[in-house]
Every structure is written in C-alpha cells, then in structure tokens.
Image (cartoon, helix red, strand yellow):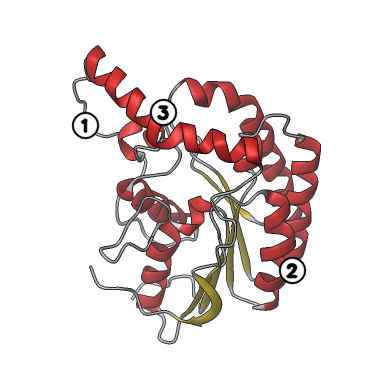
Amino acid sequence: MQNHPHYTSFVAVGDSFTEGMSDLLPDGSHRGWADLLASRLAALTPGFRYANLAVRGKLIGQIAADQAPPAAAMRADLVTLVGGLNDTLRPGCDMGRVRARLEEAVEILAPSCRRLVLMHSPGRTGPVMERFRPRMEELFAHIDVLAARHGALVIDLYGSGALGDPRLWDADRLHLAPEGHRRVAEAVWQGLGFPAEADWRAPLPPSLPPGWTARRADDLRFARRHLGPWIGRRLTGRSSGDGRAAKRAELLPYHPPGP
C-alpha cells in the first residue's frame, strides 16, 4: 500500500477561477478544479470536510478582508489561495497595493493550516494576455517570495504552455473550460504529492486553425456577449460577484455530486 499525504479538510479561497466558473453541472451550478480536488481527497478520507469561499469578480483586497479570516478560523489541513489576477486586469491597477493585500491574506492563512497552496494562474494565449503579462509576472514573482517566506507550495500553471491553449478556455476567454479545470485539479493533486493520474501538461492534439471568417464571427460574439458587459461593469464599478454568497461557506463533510 502506498503512503499518501493525509488531508481531512480543505478550504478554497479566491475568485471565479476557484469558484469554478464555466465548468457547469447539469443543474446549472459550477463545479471547477477545487470541487474536483475535494472529490479526490474525500475518496481517500471518510468524513472529509470542504469549504469553498471563492466568489467571482473579487479583488485581492476583498479576498484578504472577507475570505481569509473566516478561512483561517476553520483551521483546515489544506488551504488554497488564488487571487490578484482580477486586479491586474483593471485599468490603473496599483501593483503595490495588490502585493500588500496578497501578503496580508497569506499572513492570515499560513499559520492556520498544515499546507497553504498558492498558484501562478494560467493565461489564455492571445493579444489580451500579452497586454497584461508584465503585471501578471510581477504578481507571480511576489507569490514566489511569499511562498518561500511562509513555507507555502506554489503550483505553476502559468508556466504550462498547454493551459494557454484557447481550446481549454470558455467562450468568454476569461475562464477555463471543464477540461482546463480538470487539468488544474490534477496539477494541484500532483503538487500535493499524490501519484499522477494524467499528464496535465500534455498539449492538445494539433487542429486546423479556424478561417478568417470564423475567427471574425467568434470575435464579434465574444465582444457582444462577454467583452461589452465586462467593460460595462468596470465603468460603473460593479462586479459579477456583487451580492453573491460563497457556494460552500461552511467547512462540512463533502459528498460529491453525481456525474
């Protein structure tokens, strides 16, 4: 019998990436990589408990103020913190403030758990990614500094070329599609020391690129359905997560939903 790490509880903290956006279940709820990871861990440990405090659209200051303290109070074995990327996508982003609030969240969470996991978030290949790449890499460099200081584990999703493949992203170009979430769950699983069940870094099979007409039609659909509303929220100071509660606000026994 192999010896595996033992985790009896897991709390996930963050934004839409951790909430599981664009990985829809039949009932219309979102699953995502954190739920997938919780399902694997629950299969190993009877009575395993899981909470997911992540809410779409949240900035790192909101995560530090509203999610980190209750997550720390749960005293879970495992905590994941992914945040700050929403800040880097906003005009006039103050990276000094982002770094400070991320550090605040880490300092709250690190002493409360046995294993804190941080991540370099993946980025979809394309011109938008190139525009924000310097801010993202500044954020990731600070994550590495904090991880070294507090003994946290860093999962480098950004460094995987495979996760940049547009086919692993939803039509909104902001959130991973189900296969992308599956790969993130596998990456964290392996990072925690469990044996690999798949190669999450494997590139997708080659495919013929869409023609010019198909690309333009896709760009128009994206602008109408996703980019326009996103810009509207930025201009009015609104967020997709306003008034939305966490999907699993309490650390309770986890029973994964059916397929």
Residue named by callout 2 = 111
Mark 1 packing: few (<14 Cα in 10 Å), some, or many (20+)?
A: few
Label 1: which residue? 205
Q: Residue furthest top?
A: 212
Dot 3 or dot 2: first in sequence order is 2
Quarter occupied by residue 44: bottom left
Residue 71 visible, this angle: yes
Q: Which residue is mark 3?
A: 223
Q: How far apart in space, not on screen, are marks 2 and 1 (Cα)?
A: 43 Å
Secondary structure state at the residue bearing disc 1: loop
Query: Which amino acid, mark 3?
Result: Ala
**Residue at left offset 64%, top offset 40%:** 236
Q: How many marks?
A: 3
Label 3: state its secondary structure.
Answer: helix
Q: Mark 1 or mark 3, which is nearer to you?
A: 3
Q: Position of residue 42 (x, y in %)?
A: 40, 76
**Most foreground residue, 115 or 167:** 167
Q: Split into 4 quadrants, where in the image is the N terminus?
A: bottom left
Residue 102 badge:
none
Q: Residue 217: horizontal and vertical position, in percent? A: 28, 22
List x then y, in percent, for residue 86. Answer: 60, 42
Judging from the image, what secondary structure is the residue with disc 2 in?
helix
Q: Residue 33, relative to residue 224: is it above or below?
A: below
Q: Determine the residue positioned at 45% across, 61% down.
A: 34
Front residue (pair 257, 202): 257
Q: Nearer the viewer, mark 3 or mark 2?
A: 3
User: At 63% from the left edge and 31% from the top edge, which residue is drawn?
Assistant: 137
